[in-house]
Image: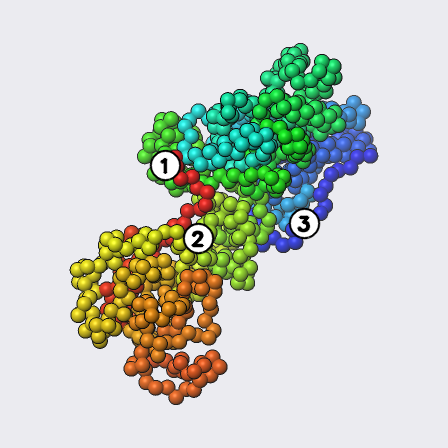
Amino acid sequence: MTTIIVDAQRTSTPHWPVPQERRTVTVLFADIVGSTALVDRLDPEDVRALQRAYFDTVAGVLHRWQGVVEKYVGDAVMALFGARHSDGFDAYRAVRAGLEIQAALDRRPMVGDSRLRVRVGVATGEVVVDLGSAVSGGHGVASGAVITSAARLQEYAPPGAVALCAATARATAGLITQRQLTPVSVAGRVPPMPVWHAVGPVRPGTDRHDGPLIGRRRELATIRDQLSRAIREQDPRWISLVGPTGSGRSRLLHELTRGLTTVDGMPVRWCVATCQPYPDQVMAPAAELLRGLAGVRHGDGPAVVHDRLVAALASLFPPERVAAAIPALQRFLTTPDGSSAALAGAAICRDVLLRLAAHQPLIVAVDDVDRAAPAMSRFLHALFSTATARGLPLALITLHQPQWADTRPSPARRVTIGPLATVQSGRLLRHLLTRAGQPVTLADRLLHLVGGRPGHAAAYVRSIMDGADRMTLPLPEAVRRAVCAELDHLDGERRAVLMAAATIGGVISGGAVDRALGWASGRSAPALRGLVAAGLLLPRRADGYAFVAPALRQVAAERLPRALRAVFGRRAAEAPPLDTVRPDAALPRDHSAADRAGSGRAAADRAGSGRAAADRAGSGRAAADRAGSDRAGSDRAWSDRAWSDRAGSDRAAVSGSGVRRAEVLPLDVVRAGDGRRDVVLAVPPSDPTDPLRRGLPSSTMATSPTAPNDGANRSLGFRRLRAVASAGDVPPTRASATPNNAGGHWPAAPDRSPATIRAVPAVPGPAGRTAAAGAGAPPDVVRTGPRPPLIRWPTGLAASA
């Protein structure tokens, strides 16, 4: 009795904040050839048995390649790949499934002498997916023209063949052998549709790395030092090289294998493998290690494989052990699956590597280990633990993405590959454009698009070579697939937060994300911190974030349906009015006061010291006349030198939706226009003799009992003060002290006349620096100026090219 495989359970995620997404999926459409004539000549019971055998075979193959059966239409089956989760190889898995369906039906016996022949069409394109229904047997999961395209394509496939659309052919280039046919005319479509036929899978070759290495010198030196110490001290080390797709992990590994060939005069042996997307070859990376060790190439005959294995093992094992191991290793190289025979061959392969390390320093490297099956992870762990117990000069390097569930042992060292610096990205783009014969002037336009990822830079240049519009510079398909896979590593809530954040312009705040999603205040904070840990967002200021790459922001925004995108954007724009001034994030404490505040000549240039300052601010006697006395004018201006020495790093800043940098004067020169408005002054919390405090009359200000005093304020020496008028400006009030007005310091009915606070241009100077607060300003004016964006480089960036 056969059983049709159907996933009856819906997604286990209880709540999906964004119920629908625009996604790029691959659709497979399979239909029986001549089903009408076949059914007419069979008994109904035979028809039933034939259909069950057919659907069981097709559904089993689709399930193994992670396809979702969306519907059965008569004798046709439609399946989706990438509807709920994408690994970047959706098109590849769909084509492999189509080829395997044809082979499985050819092998499976049917009713009587009947033989089923099917046509398969595979198309890739954008659809709107109902995420809650993305399960096998769920009808109406996806909507889009690509579904019709897949159905049309199978009509043009010969019996037993798999037809591909142009997008599918591009996505599987280098992975699937293809043959292009003459474009076919499809009703209602102009021009004719190009068609490819899939011939079979091919093993992808290694990437070429013939250009100069740009950047990564620091990471390269760190890894080389760790490898050298492992070999020199005979203390095995596991180094985990972590970075997103396109960050240049494989390029760095290539540089290591080429540059680190000896340690203290001893030659080093490298064994390198890559985990390909072959779910039926779970131990294929271990087989690749053995092939590289013995010099066996794909396509070598059995006799050649035998001779090469004997030559590789002769110096490591006694003759009788070699004779017993060769047959098992040959079977392992032929079929490195998860069978017991293959696992026995993998155990022999591990023993070979350990014996080799005892004779010669050995470095084992496995790229894209996040694709590895659990059996391959166990193989690597056993290799490392045994080498550690024996004290062998062996090192292990694994390369993977940040989102991978890390299964490294505890002593492993983690090296993170961050984005390239701007100058390095520019050098790389100019090199790639020159080698491609393209104008180097395009580098300026591409610089902000690549986001410091070498892989993105190469993809953009390749798309230009393939005819992409130089004016619009659309996102390359390879970059889109990789970014979609990054997004799909996230759970529903973090993905929704990322997509909502993509609709917000500028620096992203947690409050804006909460408003966009309609959440309670603070609910998105854990998800935003998780996105930072996953390497998708960068922290900016106290409550701000930015995307690590422009492509990530674009894809995340385009995932949202148009209506939902508009709703998120409108909600995020409905920010409450700015009524507080909060301290900015702390500036680095390891910089000198001259660097932070611009002391000396730089401070004079920025703050307008000397005669220029006197002209602008009316220093000396003019300032004293306006303020009332020489001493008061001096104190209220907060001398330039005192500000440079003490307050250069304690600048106040306006935070929120209207971000500005504030420069605050003593309160007795500010006429209170609104008693509810808070101002944060850069006032040291102690030392009443400090010149920064002497000019602040305590009789005209008091600290609010309910004013927040968070850790940031305490660490920077900020105090939140209530701005009130001087004693002579406000008439006495009849209000008595209340619990919230202890001591009667706060006027019950503050003067509602307009405050003499006016905005004036900031003192000219480099972006990110401000002049001394109040320096050169009249005593009744608070100087405010536009706040330039705060640039904070992420940790781990390479500083040298």
Q: Nearer the viewer, residue 5 or 645?
A: 645
Q: Which element is circle 2 on? A: strand
Q: Quadrant of the C terminus?
A: top left
Q: Residue furthest bottom?
A: 734
Which numbered disc covers residue 12? 3
Frontmost residue, 498 versus 721: 721
Is 713 on the left-hand or right-hand side of 671? Answer: right
- Which residue bears the numbered disc 2? 540
- Please state which of the two labelled residues, at mark 1 or mark 3, is closer to the viewer: 1
Q: Residue at x 76, y 32 (%)?
A: 53
Q: Quadrant of residue 28?
A: top right
Disc 2 crowd rating (10 Å Cα; few below 14, some 14-19, many 20+) is some
Q: Which residue is mark 1?
A: 426
Q: Earlier in the sequence, mark 1 or mark 2?
A: 1
571 left or right of 442 in image: right
Choose top left, top right, bottom left or bottom right for residue 314: top right
Chain-order first, disc 2 or disc 3: 3
Decide: is 244 above or below 725: above
The quadrant of the picture occupied by the N terminus is: top right
Give the residue type that dot 2 points to: Arg
**Which picture quadrant has residue 643?**
bottom left
Depth check: give the residue in front, 450 or 55. 450
The mark found on residue 721 in the picture is none
Inter-mark Cα distance, 2 to 3: 34 Å
Looking at the rendered image, the disc whose residue lies closer to the viewer, 2 or 3, is: 2
